[in-house]
Amino acid sequence: MDSAGAKIGAGAAAAAHSSEPLPLRIKLLYGAPSFAGAAMVIPIFIHMPKFYADVVLVPLGYLAMAIAIARSLDALSDPLMGWISDHTHTRLGRRRPYMLFGAPLCGVAFFALLNPPASFTGGRAAIWFGVTFILYFVFHTIYVLPHYALGPELTQNYHERSSLFAWRESFSILGTIVAAAAPGVMMQAFHMTERQVFFRLGIFFGVVLSVLYGLLVLTVKERPDFVTRESNPLVPGVRRALRNRPFAILLGSYVVASISGAIPATMMPFFNAYVIRPRNPTFWLSMLLLGYFAFAFVSVPIWLAIARRVGKLNAYLASFFLSITGGGAMFLLGPGDTWWLLVLICWAGIGLGAGLFLTPSMQADVIDYDELYTGKRREAQYTAFWSMLPKFVAIPSAAIPIAVLASLGYIPNAVQAPRVVFAIRAIFALGPAACSMLSFLIARRFPMTEAIHNTILEGIARHERGHAAFDPMTGLMVPAPKAGHDDDVGWFLDYFSIGELKRYLARGASQPVRDVLTVAAVSIGVSALSVIYVLRRVSSLRTDPGAITSLIVVTAGLAFAIFVFHLMRLGPARRLAAGEVPAEAIRAHLGQVVEALREGAPIAVAASGVADRG
């Protein structure tokens, strides 16, 4: 233990200056586009479900189904976009080309989503919602994944990363505040209808998004040493990312915490209108959102100072107290408790300010740990994980609540039955509080500190000089990754799990293809049966498909994602069956992976053998 501490201290001293502070100009240019990007989320998730339900008159079940379909496809596009961005080599770099054309297209889709034709109702309006919702998120993925992947590349300094992401998320909160307040203020001050408000918001934020991303692309350059790094195959990259223990812990906490955000985003308009029942629900909804995000915005520099003093993890853990207590207390509210709700919303907003920038900052540190073992920079692939998995969780979090309300007898613009009111209170208040508690328990296991991170950076520098490096989290000496045949074999064998490789050695050459085809067949079968069920349920656009249909749509999306993943493994399985890799090399690889997993290392270093204990 003392030896490890000494090595950490030496690494920290050597790595403290490994990245110069970022100029404020870069932080502003990198962060500013998030103003418009985040602002768009508010009308989409807060206002659109209720707008399409109460004004456009689309049945709630169809909205739930459309959201589920759109978010499923959106989640599938994340890993593909991450892989494409990491493999792109142009004069503009790996990230900037996609921001340049993705943002304007997203702005167009955003405008269309907010402005359905006035003649559309029922089934036609549901189709319009679903198509524009899908297009918005496809184009959103094209520009936002490269944008977020660019952040970890701009600096490797432990605290500068927190500052960079604090600026980005401050712009996000500012855009959210403007979007949250705008509808209520515009309707109150200028006596506009909802359609008039959304028409103006669609034009404004679409233009601002395009302009700010254009400025970013023209003024902020990518690091040339990262742009020229060799990339990795998609499927082995997924497997190696999931072996990264700090990342898996952080991702697990973030996925659970995403439920705490998805449920209130969908349910707040219903809680406000049918539980609290203020005289002007639209105005008070804007005030609640304004208070929530305003207090998050004000708290960011406070949390940044706390993180510098006690570390990112401790600051992040402290923020959960506010969301747990605030959410639980909201369950006790009833009609007329408007001001109490505002106080509790602001209290929870303070906790939001910490998680917004600390989690991406901690994720960026984890990407450096991956480089220590792989020698590759995979920002976009890790960012895709960060974006994709919470979406699969957020799909039922957003779609199921409104589908449940529909099944319980929700009636638009009317006094709700007691069971509907109780369901709204429980889903809005107790669900997020419970998820925040679980997320806190997972996050407590995150092992990385500033000293450990600095030692990792020193290890990366030693690898660049061809020397072995110390892993402060496992106590292992990690050989420098070496490009060449052995490394290629290691990545190739990571197309397969430990069990699949053992079955190949025990049962013969055809086993890998059988394994892949079996899982692919089962998953596409589940997806096809789910689609058939949904089509039968929605054979008439005049009927509400019900809550169960949203769950089936989510199942279809997950099953199809598994099918695509295994389909990409079919070619490598055939190559393995053809004897492309000798059995001795497979046994050596298995030994390395098992040893690495036993020691808690993210991967085995195939090119250099098992890492030695320091």
Image (spheres, rainbow, N blue to C red):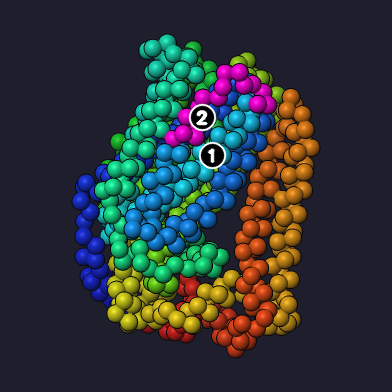
Label placed on residue 135: 1
Q: Is residue 222 above or below residue 596?
A: above
Rendering coords of residue 457 (x, y %): 31, 69
Q: Which residue is mark 2?
A: 112
Can residue 95 be spotted in the picture? yes
Say which residue appears at 64% left-offset and 51% top-offset.
558
Residue at the farthest front position: 91
Can residue 311 be spotted in the picture? no
Indicate the amino acid at tag 2: Ala
Indicate the amino acid at tag 1: Leu
Residues packed near mark 1 inside 10 Å, few (<14), some (14 to 19) or many (20 plus): many
Does residue 467 show up magenta in the picture?
no
- Residue 172 versus residue 194: which sits nearer the camera? 194
Q: Verify CB contact (< 8 Å) between mark 2 and mark 1.
A: yes
Residues packed near mark 2 inside 10 Å, few (<14), some (14 to 19) or many (20 plus): many
For the record, the magenta segment spans: 107-124
| Gap between marks 2 and 1 measured at Cα | 10 Å
